[in-house]
Image (cartoon, rainbow, N blue to C red):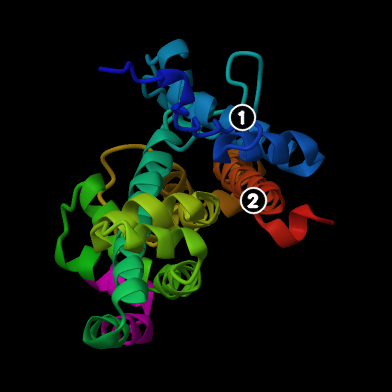
Amino acid sequence: MTAVDTSAVEAPAAKPRRTFRESTFGQIWTGLTRSPAGFAGTVLVLGIVLFSFVGPLVVDQDNPTDTTKIWTAPSGEHWLGTQYEGKDTFTILVNSGAEPIWVGGMAAVMAVFVAVVLGSIAGYFRGRIDAILLQLTDVTVTIPQFLLMIAVVAFFEDIPPWGVAIVVGSTMWAFLFRSIRAQVMSLKEREFVEAAKLQHLGPMRIVFREILPNMAGFIFVNFVIAVNQAIYAIVGLYILGLMPSGTPNWGLMIHLSWQNNFFLLPVAMPFVLAPLLMIVLFTIGLVTMGRGLDQALNPRLRER
């Protein structure tokens, strides 16, 4: 009985590992640090997020009503002055950013999730499923989003913040659906998908394990855009006075300043300008961060 020469048996080639720079997160980091505007936007967004979520833990929450200090100008004691009840405006501003940010983020997660799942299924399977989902998308797009949100919020008077996120998210997914569908239709013709089919992998595994990871950058960029749109919608509902006034937020500050005739007193301007500035800065940060991500993850822009 002869011994088998095991040295002649070649070990299977190890699958090359992707370096951090080659990974999606590495490309995101490279793009944000390479682009000065994208990096500045990221720092601005993170700064406002820390201000809104960590600030309430640092700032003294004791903000009593003082009728002797109604609409006072900024001072050493009150950095942004006081509002119509004599409360410190800066303290209110610190406590007003968390809700629109996390509700906007939740709405964006919902919208992107629905668009990715439905768009992937429609783009890969095509046929009747694709036709039905396209019809559903056409109907959703034709409905005025903001009017639908106003109608739903007005019907449910005491709607909680997570309910607002569901309402906003359910009206935003249709526009991203078509982009996801087109991306999946393009990627399903690539060689790695054909190889997965030859290995008899299931359709769902091909879609969610092979195709979607190659769209991670595109999905993340659209998530950033969706957060921006959701925050605008939520703040708009508060400015119109359609939302419950229990928790302080930027939109409610603007609504209350208008309701209490801030335009009649110059010293009342910080109460409305401060939340407006926060909204504008956060929007600018998201837009510039999104551009930096697009330059990092879009192959056509990356080659320039």
- Between 69 and 292, the residue placed more toward the observer is 292
Residue 259 x, y percent position in the rendering = 42, 54
Residue 102 x, y percent position in the rendering = 37, 40
- Relative to residue 22, is residue 147 drawn left or right? left
Disc 1, SS: loop
- Between 215 and 14, the residue placed more toward the observer is 14
The image's mark for residue 19 is 1
Q: Residue at x 35, y 50 (%)?
A: 209
What's the amino acid at mark 1? Thr
Q: CA distance from mark 2 to mark 1?
A: 16 Å
Residue 302 x, y percent position in the rendering = 76, 53
Where's the C terminus, which quadrant? bottom right
- Between 36 and 235, the residue placed more toward the observer is 36
Residue 33 is covered by the magenta coloring: no
Q: Predominant secondary structure in magenta?
A: helix
- Relative to residue 265, is residue 82 drawn left or right? left
Task: State the extent of the magenta-drawn residues as a range.
Answer: 136-151
Q: Is residue 260 visible?
A: no
Q: Residue at x 23, y 59 (%)?
A: 202
Residue matched to label 2: 297
| Disc nearest the viewer among 2 and 1 | 1
Please identify the quarter of the rendering in which residue 235 is found: bottom left
Farthest front residue in view: 1
Residue 43 x, y percent position in the rendering = 66, 31
What's the amino acid at mark 2? Leu
Disc 2, SS: helix
Q: Is residue 111 above or below residue 103?
A: below
Q: Is residue 12 visible?
A: yes
Q: Residue at x 57, y 33 (%)?
A: 18
Mark found first going from the N terminus, 2 or 1 = 1
